[in-house]
Image (spheres, helix red, strand yellow):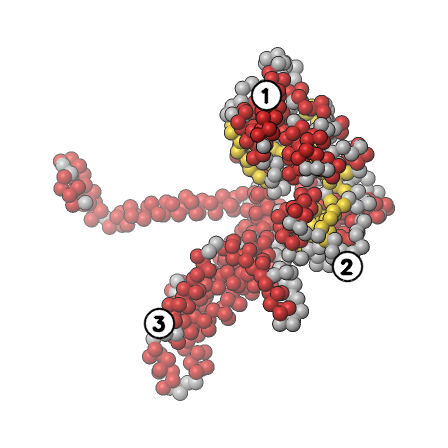
Amino acid sequence: MAVAAARATGPLRGARRALSGVFWRYPWLKAAALLAPPLGWFVAVYLAALAALFISAFWSVDPFTTEVVRVWNVDNFRTLWEEVAYRNIALRTIGIAAAVTLTDMLLAFPFAYYLARVASPRLRGALFVMTLLPLWSSYLVRVYAWRLILSHDGALNWALNGLGLPDQSIAYTNWAMWVVFSYVWLPFMVLPIYASLERIPDSFLEASRDLGAHGWTTTRRVVLPLALPGVVAGSIFTFSLTLGDYITPTLVGGPGSQFIGNVVYASVGISNNVPFAAAFATVPLAVMAVYLTVARRLGAFEAL
Amino acid sequence: MRGRFKLTHVALAAVTVALAIPAAGASKSTGLPTTIGPGEGSLSLVGWEGYAEDQWVKPFVKNTGCKVSRKYAGSSDEMVTLMRQGGGGQYDLVSASGDASLRLIYGKDVQAVNPALIPDFKNFIGPLKSPPHNTIKGVHYGISLQWGPNVLLYNTAKVKPAPTSWSVLYDAKYKGKITVPDNPIQIADAALYLSKTNKALGITDPYELNKAQLDAAVALLKQQKPLVKKYWALASDQIDLFKNGDSTIGASWPYQTNTLKAAKATVADLIPKEGATGWADTWMLSAKSKHPNCAYLWMAWVSTPLVQAQQAVYFGETPANTLACKEMDKLAKGSCAQYHANAPISYFNQIKFWKTPVADCGNGKKDCMDYTKWQQAWTQVKG
């Protein structure tokens, strides 16, 4: 850089000096120039796509030729509201996302606590690798693996029969989806909770004990409040990832396991009804907007 | 193997020569081509899985110089969407089933073709020369390919006695063991069953349903839903379910039966006494095709007895070309009879072939439920 500047001759050098002078005099201009490319990308790619989504949600398609008719109407939203099937699908999606989030919280918290505050450094390293190892393989492979575990002649029934227990038949049900989702998103809950637990100074816990608090009281009044941002941050991942998924319902779900994502996928890829897909896609968007607002209140963004 | 390739060369050469003979140019009255010009060097297809296998694609590429790129679609709806993507013209040909073909014709996504350019057309089974799903007012919008029934597949070790009626799919006896295709056209299967078991509804054609009849079919399917293990989207899904013992009975295609039997599974299939729905596929030429000559060469090639037989045996369906029977038996002994390639017309007529449900179903009242209604009804069934 320095060499290039030294080599720059006459007019070019003058222009550069003038420019740096301008930037020095107007610091906001410097900030603007620095931010313009990423901001432009954000607006063009992200916000413009969202705007297009919102606008097309108010269009409709010709039923026979399935061409988009650009006439403003709220028919798509009316169908969503009035059709019981779509309401059930939305509620199912949100309900399972919430159940998965809760399950992962209960599973991840003790594990993360052990990882952050009990395990020796060596054991911690090993456990960390084990937590992250599944993420190295494709998500699809792991979901298919669960299909093999849960199927009628699968590993789980084989083990149950070996123990003299009767068969289970949770394959291709909402229960199977709950199990698989809880498994695939668990690492995303463990890591933020671990990060927030690790930050709690030992002195806080000692002080709590000095003041006569029992282990449970310390957990409830010191550890939990300080870990809460991490838990909420983790829940953003598990909740939003479940909310937007459509592959797991296709692969391990049963006859009544459609998610919002499945309807969106079918509307775009199969019946070519993009406006309806856009309208339904605004539902998880609205749910996440509410969720993030609450999460922000709880301080989740400080733990990310 | 050597011998067969030589035979394919000869056949293709014969086709090309036969096509080159008619006078040059396009006929003025219809605008249809009267000859096939030189190939454009490439061809892109949308087809069902197994409809463009190397077995017959490779010799085609070698002889015509048309490089083939394939895209497999999982449903008729997806095929229609693919043909319309980006304003159309991305793909040259589509192997549309009857439930997609009318949508493509009325949507102006495909163009009329000249069957005189397909030498084997004269050997096609009568009803598939100008069937209502691809020929409108004498204008051909494609060349018929293959056909077959949707069958009742069951595990012979688990389902006893052997079923004879579709009623087993609505029977609580097999609760949690039933698999059904995830496809709106599946409503026709319920309607066909109702047309035989509930005469009061007055269903004559399972694709022409008024509101009351559609509601009855949907009610039957909703009643079936708690018995269903899985609505399958891909044939391979149903094959897995049968292999793992998750499903023992279901609505299926002969393709699954073949694959499962090859894997030594104890399965059989049948056309139950109520009859069956079925498919009859057509290669249709995109209205904006960039490679029409290669497309014509392809349609002529896949109509020849050998390729018809290869595809029929590979997929488990019946060729449109009646001369394919001998070739099928050469490829796999007894396959001609197995897939009814030599069956009388009465066999063909007992199958209710897929067609696009439209509002104007010919009774002058335009009160039939169109395909959009079927799609919505299917979403409600699945919930």
Marks 2 and 1: which is nearer the front? 1
Q: Residue at x 51, y 23 (%)?
A: B40
Residue B173: mark: 2
Residue A139 visible in the current orientation: yes
Q: Say which of B223 and A56 sits in front.
A: B223
Classify mark 2: helix, strand or loop: helix
Which amino acid, by three-letter code, is at mark 2? Lys
Query: Residue A38 location, x and y as percent?
Result: 35, 47
Asked whether, in this view, residue B323 is left or right of residue B274, the answer is left
Left-right relation of A60 to A290: right
* Residue B184 visible in the picture: no
In the displayed structure image, the side of residue B298 where residue A111 appears, left or right: left
Q: Which residue is mark 1?
A: B13
In front: B229, or B325? B325
The residue wearing badge 3 is A121
Assign a secondary structure to mark 3.
helix
Question: Share a chain, discs 1 and 3?
Answer: no
Local crowd size for mark 1, using a 10 Å CA cut-off: few (<14), some (14–19), many (≥20): some
Structural crowding at the residue carrying mark 3, measured as other residues with C-alpha within 10 Å and reported as few (<14), some (14–19) or many (≥20)? few
Mark 2 vs mark 1, CA separation in Å: 57 Å
Which residue is painted at 41% across and 64% down in the image? Answer: A129
Residue B189 percent location from the top left of the image: 75, 45
The span from disc 3 to disc 2 (Cα, nearest Å) is 58 Å
Q: Quadrant of the C terminus of chain A?
A: bottom left
Look at the picture and state if A210 lies above or below A45.
below
Quadrant of res B157: bottom right
